Amino acid sequence: METTHTKFPTPPWDMETAAKRLAFEEAAWNTHDPDQILEGYADVIEMRDGLDFINGKQALKQFLTRKFQTQLDYTVTLDLWGALKGRMAVRFEAEWHDAAGQRYRSYGVQVFQFNDQGLAERRFASQETRPI
């Protein structure tokens, strides 16, 4: 059973409350801690991150663990484009390096759908990654 979180606002969003919820998302991802990131996601999460399709919180934890083992020093910046009811459109930029030291940057867009508790139920990210 999911717990109610008070760390962030809940829908329906306006641009101000959506930006506050998005700040939690950005901060959580930049910790590289799967458990902290998972606090913002519903148990039944449907997600696409680039070419990875994730269903369920346990699969998301496994994905995040793999991601942070290969995308070292990962940092992401999220920019809110729009928010309506329980949905958000977000532009993002992420940087990291691999074990050999090659640096990469990804640019893309994400769309989120949140439940009434402010937990992400669906998240779809399209991105392009390039070495820098």
Image (cartoon, rainbow, N blue to C red):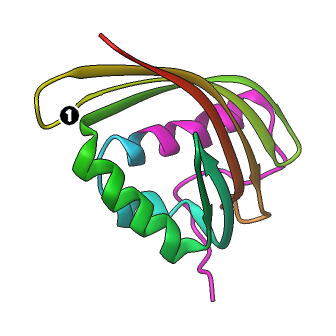
Residues rendered magenta in the picture: 1-26
Percent of width and height locating residue 54: 60, 62
For residue 92, say whether it is visible.
no
Query: From the image, which quarter does the N terminus lie in?
Result: bottom right
> Residue at the spot x=50%, y=65% of the render?
60
> Residue at the spot x=66%, y=50% of the render?
9
Q: Is 12 situated left or right of 78 in this image?
A: right
Residue named by callout 1: 98
Rendered position, 102 above or below 61: above
Rendered position, 72 above or below 62: above
Q: Name the amino acid, label 1.
A: Asp
Query: From the image, which quarter does the C terminus lie in?
Result: top left
Specify the quadrant of the image occupied by residue 100. Answer: top left
Q: Which residue is situated farthest in the right direction here?
A: 85
Secondary element under disc 1, as helix, strand or loop, is: loop
Decide: few, some or many residues near mark 1? Use Cα within 10 Å; few <14, some 14-19, many ≥20: some
> Residue at the spot x=58%, y=44% of the render?
51
Rendered position, 34 above or below 98: below
Number of marks drawn: 1
The answer to whether residue 127 is magenta is: no
Percent of width and height locating residue 10: 72, 54
